[in-house]
Every structure is written in C-alpha cells, then in structure tokens.
Amino acid sequence: MIAPRHFGRGPDAQALERAGQEFHAFAAVLDETLAGRTWLVGDRLSYADFRVASVLPFAAEARLPLDGYRHIEDWHARLMDLDAWRSPFEGLD
C-alpha cells in the first residue's frame, strides 16, 4: 500500500465533499449506461472500455465508493477476466 502524502495542511474537507458528490453523479450515469450492456460502446470490447475503466484497478486504494453500482462492478469483473487487464505488465521483467 502506498502511504498517503499530505502537502500543506492536509485534505480540504469541502473539496472532498464536492468530489464525492461529483463522483456519485457521474458513477450513476456510467452505471445506468452499462445497464443491459456487456461493454460500454456497442456489443464488443473497445478502447472506450479501457479508457473509462483505467481508474478501476486503483479503486480500492483510492477508496472510490463503488458499492451499489452493480453494473460498474459487473463490467469491471468482465475486464478482470482478461489476462492483459488483470496483469498488464506480466513478462516485462
């Protein structure tokens, strides 16, 4: 786990509150968009899936509140089925 870094006086509670509100607003849109879909655009995996989901491998560490966004969780689980998504740096020793 990466230790948190604080620059200055620490986190701004109001900024964190606004960011949380924005997160939930956009997560709700994404969750609704994924309802009834396997992938984000059309019926097959695309660059859009990887681009939009690029934050998901760090969701736990960033404490993103994804609980309750079932379609996002299901979509990420489908991405995790891909070896290249699950282990993108494998073999690059």
Image: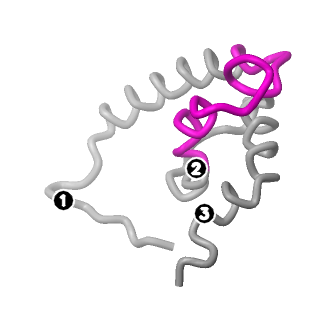
What residue did someone put label 2 on?
59
**Position of residue 54 measured from the top left corner of the image (x, y, whole percent):** 54, 44
**Residue 32: % across, % down:** 71, 15
Q: For the residues marked 1 and 3, what is the alpha-carbon distance in whole angstroms? A: 31 Å
Q: Looking at the image, do the residues carrying marks 1 and 3 touch, with CB atoms under 8 Å apart?
A: no
Q: Which residue is mark 3?
A: 88
Residue that numbered label 1 is attached to: 7
For label 1, count other residues whose C-alpha is less than 10 Å away and answer few (under 14), some (14-19) or many (20+). few
Q: Amino acid at mark 3?
A: Pro
Q: Secondary structure at mark 2?
A: helix
Looking at the image, which is closer to me, 66 or 78? 78
Classify residue 33 by image quadrant: top right
Which residue is situated farthest in the left direction here? 8
Label 3 with label 2: CB-CB less than 8 Å = no
Neighbor class of circle 3 (other Cα within 10 Å; few <14, some 14-19, many 20+) is: few
Q: Amino acid at mark 2?
A: Ala
Q: Whole-percent x and y of residue 77?
A: 80, 45
How far apart are the alpha carbons under marks 3 and 2?
Answer: 17 Å
Residue occupying the point 60% across, 25% down:
27
Q: Who's the residue at 81% across and 37% down the image?
A: 74
In depth, the one of 1 and 84 nearer the eye is: 84
What's the magenta region?
32-56
- Mark 3 / mark 2, whichever is N-terminal: 2
Do the numbered discs 2 and 1 sit on residues whose CB atoms are within 8 Å?
A: no
Where disc 1 sits, the SS reads loop
- Residue 36 as seen in the image, left or right of residue 8: right
State the mark number for residue 67.
Answer: none
